[in-house]
Amino acid sequence: MNDQLRIVVNPVGHQPTSQVLAVAAVLALEWAAPYVNSVIGDNGPFVIQPQVEAVGGLLRLDPERSERLQLAGRSALSEGESEIRIAEDDEGNWNIPDQIDNWWVAGLALSATEFVASTANGIAIAETLAIGNRTDQRCIDLLEKSQQWAMKQIDDLVRATADSNPRLLGNLLLSLSSEVETLADTHANLRARYQADIETISEHL
């Protein structure tokens, strides 16, 4: 882990809306750059604050991870199977207990049957979570916007690392190059092994 680039997402505040936006930012960063260790915290060599453009990162959750977060969120409130209705005030606070883990709060948002938002960020979160069709243009736009936001943060991180720790950046580039070469070799070996099968299948298509 010491040889991995690290980016720390620091929520703007301790309100649940800020916590969920930080989770969205981490998800966007994980998708854009899996070679970067993206975490939520308040200190580190490279710290950023999430912005509403990152909210589309919530759409990167796969069903299994989403389910785990929902279960964790419900467990934190001891809600079981009861409906969760979220009401946000004009400061980003919700009608839930304080000091709940960032990811569990995101799980509650995912579980909510109703999310009445008051702030601009809260409305963005509620509208994002309400998207059911991933082919919807609104979904595509949010994903693209979160990707652009994440890549800008990664570009800034790379520039900062190049100035402060060029050796780390060099090691990372070598590691990524080796992984690409390994994948290429594996693909070539698999194709050679199953070439006859591939040709047979192609003939019957």
Image (spheres, helix red, strand yellow):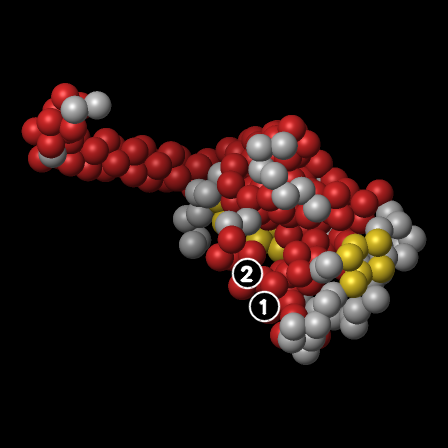
**Residue furthest front in the image:** 204
Q: Position of residue 87 (x, y in %)?
A: 85, 60
Q: Amino acid at mark 2?
A: Glu
Instruction: Identify the residue position indicated by label 2 in the image.
Output: 67
**Residue furthest bottom in the image:** 78
Residue at point 51% right, 50% down?
A: 62
Q: Amino acid at mark 1?
A: Leu
Nearer to me, 2 or 196 = 196
Nearer to me, 164 or 40 = 40
Q: Is residue 124 left or right of residue 45?
A: right
Q: Residues within 10 Å of mark 1 (few under 14, many from 20)?
A: many
Q: Position of residue 135 (x, y in %)?
A: 58, 33
Instruction: Tell me the quarter of the picture where residue 205 sits.
Output: top left
- Which numbered tag is attached to residue 50? none
Residue at point 63% right, 43% down?
A: 132
> Which quadrant, please, contains the N terminus?
bottom left
Number of dots carrying numbers: 2
**How far apart in space, not on screen, are marks 2 and 1 (Cα)?**
6 Å
Nearer to me, 16 or 9 = 16
Q: Is residue 175 left or right of residue 91?
A: left
**Residue furthest right in the image:** 90
Q: Is residue 28 left or right of residue 42?
A: left
Residue at point 19% right, 37% down?
A: 186
Instruction: Identify the residue position indicated by label 1 in the image.
Output: 71
